[in-house]
Amino acid sequence: MATTLSPASSPTRQEGPPGTAPPQSPEVSTPTVMLVGNPNVGKSVIFGYLTGKYVTVSNYPGTTVEVSRGTMRYGGKTWEVIDTPGVNSLVPQSEDERVTRDLLLQQRPDLIIQVADAKNLRRTLLLTSQLVEFGVPMMLVLNLMDEARSRNIEIDAAGLSTLFGIPVVQTVAVDGEGLHQLHRSIAKARIPVDPLTTPRQRMAAAEPLAGQLFGAGPGQLPAQLTLEWLQTRDTGLRQPVLSALALSDQEEALLGTEWRLPLRTLNGKLEALRSQFLDDTTAQHKKLLPSLADEAGENTLLRFAYKLLFIGLTLFLYTEFARLLNTIFAAALGWEFPTPYQAITGWFDHRLLPSLDSWFQSHGLGALGVLLFGTFQEESGAYESGFLYPAITQFSLLIAPVVLPLAVVLSRSRRFGEQLGRWSRQWRTGL
C-alpha cells in the first residue's frame, strides 16, 4: 500500500491530457533530470512519482529502444524528467546501454538521479563510479530496501554520502517509503566527489598521450570511461565519443594503430583500480547482519530469554484459546478444557484466599481484605474486584512471562526489533 504524500511535499503535477506536457516559454531553459540505474531497480516507479500524468514514450532516434519523458515542478521551475533504459555499465554492451550513454553525453542533464538495488551494492557502485566522472550534480537512491532488510543486509548510506559528497536516500518506492525524503533531497544534490581522480591522474601521468582525455570539471568527457569507450571496434559505439573528442583525421587513425596498445595498457590498469575500489567500498559500506539464530547462538542470556518468551507465548495463547472454547462448548460437553491458569486461580479462590480472608476478619481487617482481594461471587465461584486479585495472577501468569523476556530480547537483539518492524509493515500493507 503506497504512502500518500501531502501536496506540499510532493512534486507539483499539472493537469492535462495524457501524453502532453505543459506549455513552455521558448525563452526559458528547461532543466533536465535524468534517471539512471540498473534494470529492474524501480526506476519507473520513481519516474511516475516525479512526473505524474505527463509522460511521453518514444524510440531513441535510429533505434527501437524506448525512452520515457515527463515533467515535474520543483523549486518554482518546470523540469524535464528522462527515464533512461536500464544499464549494467556505461561501457555499452547492448543497444540499451548505448542509448543511455549517448543521452548522458549529448543532453548533459542538470541532475542525475541514480536508482539502485540496495542489496546489490557492488553493481550499484560500479555505475556510481562511472556517473561521478560526468561532473554533473547527482544523488543516489538505494531502492528495494525491504528486500535488503529481509536478507539481513545493512547499507551505510551516511558513509556513502560522505564518500561521494551527494545525498543518499533509502527507499521502498512501491510502498512510498522514503519518497518524501527523496523529494526533499533533490535540492541538496551536488557535483559528486570522484574518489578515483587522484590515483587515476597519477596513472595517466605516465602516459602523456592520455593527457588530453583527462579534462577536469563539468563539461569535460569522463576520463576513464572515454578510454574504455575507445577500446571497442564497434563504430556505432565509438563515433559519439570521437565526435565529442573532436580529434583530427590523423589522430583518429592513430587510435587504431600506434596509440592503441599504450591506451589499452593504461585502460587495463584503470579497470583494476576501479575494481579494487569497488571491492573495498562494498566491504566497508555493506554489512551482513547476524540472523536471529546467530545472535541467540552467541548470547546465552538472549538464548534463555527466547526460550522463556516461547513458553510464555505458548501459555498465553493456549489459555486464551481454551477460554474461548470453554465459552462456546463447555455447556454442551459438560466439561472444560483445563489450563494452568485455571488450576492456579482455582487454588487461590478455594484454598489460599478463604484462609487469608478469615485471617483478615479475625484481626478486624475485613475491609482491607475486601479491598485487596475482593469478595467471593457464588455465580462465578471466584474472588472478584480486588485491588490485587485477580490482577496479580493475570499479570504474573499471562503477561509477565511474555513481557519480561520480550524486554530482554528487544534490549539484546537488534535483529528481532527490525523483524518486528518488518512484520508490522507487512501487516499494515496487507490491510
Image (spheres, helix red, strand yellow):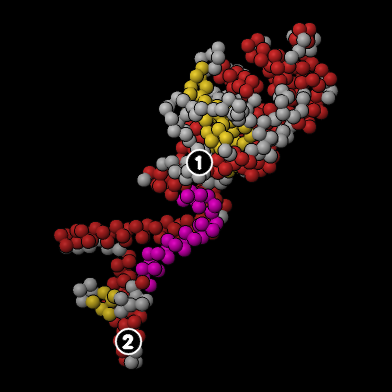
Residue beneath disc 2: 367
> Is 403 above or below relative to 19?
below
Q: Is residue 202 above or below residue 281?
A: above
Q: Which residue in the rendered view is the most extreme toward the left?
A: 332
Asked whether residue 45 appears in the rendered view, the answer is: no
- Helix, strand or loop under label 1: loop
| Extent of the magenta region | 392-421
- Point out the tag, 2 or 1, that comes first from the N-terminus: 1
Q: Is residue 412 located in the magenta-colored stretch of the structure?
A: yes
Question: In terms of image quadrants, where is residue 207?
Answer: top right
Who is closer to the viewer here, 61 or 417? 61
Q: Quadrant of the N terminus?
A: top left
Residue with the mark numbered 1: 10
70 inside magenta stretch: no
Report the amino acid beneath label 1.
Answer: Ser
Q: Nearer the viewer, residue 271 or 244?
A: 244
Q: Residues within 10 Å of mark 2 (few under 14, many from 20)?
A: few
